[in-house]
Image (spheres, rainbow, N blue to C red):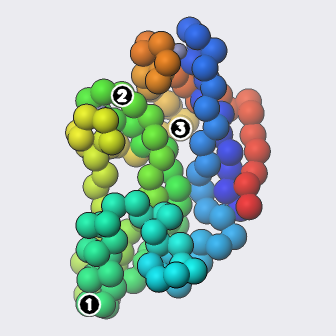
Amino acid sequence: MGEMLLFRCSECAFEDTVYVGVGMMYYPENVLNDREGGMMKDIIRSKSLREKVKKLVSEGYELESGYEEAVYTCEHCCRMTTRFRFALKHPDGAVFVPSYSCGVCKHQLIAADLDNFTPAKCPICKQRTFTYDPSTYGLWD
Ligand SMILES: [Zn+2]
Ligand SMILES: [Zn+2]
C-alpha cells in the first residue's frame, strides 16, 4: 500500500499530490518485467536505466527489499519530483543504486528527507515555498 502526499505552495496555494511507497503490483518479478504486462516501463522511465538493470539482473544481481516510489528534489533548480528508489545487490556484495537527473536542468536529483523537507521551487510561482503538508494523508492501491 502506497501513500499519497500533498505538497502545497504557501505563496500561490498551488497543490500537487504525489504517490510514494509501493502499490500492490510492485512485487519483484513484476517490477523487473519489461515485457507486455510487466511494470518495469512504468516504474523505470529511462530506457538506458532499464537496459542497465536487465544486464545486472542477468549477471545475478537481485532487487533489494525496501524499494519504493520516493520524493526527490533537484540540487540545482530545486524542482520536486518522484522516482523509483531501489538497489540491486549481487551475492558477492556489489551494490548498484541508480542516480537520477532532473528532467528540467539535468543536474542530479537527491532523495528528499520528508521529516526535514527543505521547500522546493513552486512550479507555478517559482518561489521556494513548495512544501510537504504532513497533515494530509491518503493511500493508493
Ligand atoms: Zn533541476
Ligand atoms: Zn507557488
**Residue at x 28% of width, y 47% of height:** 101
In this rendering, the label closer to the viewer, 3 or 1: 1
Residue 35 sits above or below residue 3 on the image = below
Dot 1 falls on a residue whose secondary structure is loop
The answer to which of 67 and 77 lies nearer the viewer is 77
- Which residue is disc 3 drawn over? 114
Which image quarter: residue 97? bottom left
**Does label 3 or label 2 sit earlier along the sequence?**
2
Q: Nearer the viewer, residue 23 or 95?
A: 23
**Rendering coords of residue 114 (x, y %):** 53, 38
In the displayed structure, would residue 120 be above or below residue 59?
above
In the shown orientation, is residue 64 left or right of residue 38? left
Q: Residue at x 53, y 60 (%)?
A: 68
Asked if the residue at label 1 sits under 8 Å from ligand 1, the reply is: no
Residue 69 x/y as whole percent: 53, 56
The disc labelled 2 sits on which kind of residue?
Cys
